[in-house]
Amino acid sequence: MSRLGMMLGVYTSGISGANINPAVTFTNCIFRKQSWYKFPIYAVAQIAGAFCAAGVVYGNYKSAIDIFEGGQGVRTVPGLSDTATAGIFATYPQDFVSRTTEVFNEFIAAAILMFCIYMLQDKKNMGAGKLLPLALFFVVFGIGACFGWQTSFAINMARDFGPRLFTSCVGYGSDVWTAGDYYFWIPMVVSFLGCLFGGFLYDAFLYTGESPLNEPWFGLKRLTRLNRKEEYYCRCKCPVCSCISGIAKKIRTILPFRISHSSPRVSNVFVSTSLSPQHLFSRSPPRLAQGV
C-alpha cells in the first residue's frame, strides 16, 4: 500500500514537484539546483505528514492491534514478540541480517530509486510524461519485491522516521529505537547516501542537461570532446595538456590585468578551436590561434 500512497502523492504534487522524500529533495538540491532553503521546509513537512498518516492508521486499527497483540495497551516490536505490530508503521530488519547487509540493502535500493527518477524525468529519454506517477509505482514495487524482505526497504527517511516517532509516543516505547541493534539510523542516513550515489551515476554517465557534473570547471563534461563548445589544446592533444590549458584559460578570466598576446612561446604552444561539426569529423588539425 505504500507504493499506492507514493503514486497518489506524486499525482497531487503540482505545486511542490513531488517532494515526498527528504533524500530525493536533498539530491535535487545538489544535482538539479533546487533551492536549498526549501530543503528543511520540505523535510519537516514530509516527516510531519508521515507522522500524521501513522496516527490515522493507528486510530483506525487500534482495536485490531489490541486483539492481535493480546491485550489492550500491549505494544511490541519485531524481534521481541511473535505478535509484534510496530512493523506496520516503520521498518525493521530480519533477525538474521547482518549490519553490513542492512546498509548495503538500503543503499542499493535508494540508489536505484534515484537513478530511475532521473531517468523517467529526463526529456531526452522516452520518458513517462503524465504517466510518471504510475511508472514510479512500478519502480517502487520492483524495489520492494527485490529488496523488501531483509529490511522492509525504507528508501525514505520520512516514511520511516515519522511513523517510528509516532509509535514511540503511543505505547511502543524506546524499543522502536533499540530494535535491531539500533537499526533506526540506517534508513535515516543510508537513504541519503544511496540517493546521492544514484543521482551521481545518472548525471555522470547519461545526463547531458544542467548539472554540477556537466559544469565546465567542476565536473566531467569538459573531458568529453562532443560536449565542449570552445577548448584549448596543445599540439599533442593529450588530456593532461588539455586540462592545463583549461586551467590557464580560467586563470585569465579572473586576473585583474590582461595577459599580452605577443609572446611567441605561448602562441606557438596553445591553439584554440570552436568545435563545430566540421572540426569534429575533419582529420585536419585545428587552426592555430595567435595566443591565449
Image: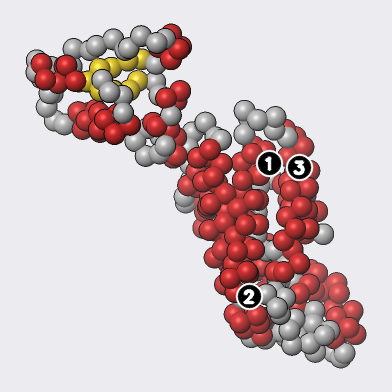
Which percent across, then down, holds residue 141? 78, 53
Location of residue 59 with respect to 236 vertically, above or below: below
Q: CA distance from mark 2 to mark 1?
A: 41 Å
Location of residue 69 with respect to 193 vertically, above or below: below
Which percent across, then down, holds residue 221? 43, 33
Circle 2 crowding by C-alpha within 10 Å: few under 14, some 14–19, many from 20? few
* Residue at image point 39% right, 16% down: 275
Which percent across, then down, holds residue 236? 27, 23
- Amino acid under disc 1: Gly
- Note whether residue 51 is visible: no
User: Mark number for residue 98?
Assistant: 2
Foreground pick, 197 / 283: 283
Nearest to the eye among marks 2 and 3: give it: 2
Give whichever of discs 2 and 3 has the lower sequence position: 2
Residue 270, image quadrant: top left
User: Mark number for residue 135?
Assistant: 3
Indicate left or right for 104 with 5 as reference.
Answer: left
Foreground pick, 62 / 113: 113
Location of residue 171 with respect to 14 vertically, above or below: below
Quadrant showing the N terminus: bottom right
Nearest to the eye among marks 2 and 1: give it: 2
Which percent across, then down, holds residue 268? 16, 16
Q: Are marks 3 and 1 in contact (CB under 8 Å)?
A: no
Indicate left or right for 250 with 220 as reference.
Answer: left
Instruction: Specify how the rendered protein is coloured.
Output: secondary structure
- Amino acid under disc 2: Ser
- Pointer 1 residue: 14
Circle 3 crowding by C-alpha within 10 Å: few under 14, some 14–19, many from 20? some
Residue at disc 1, secondary structure: loop
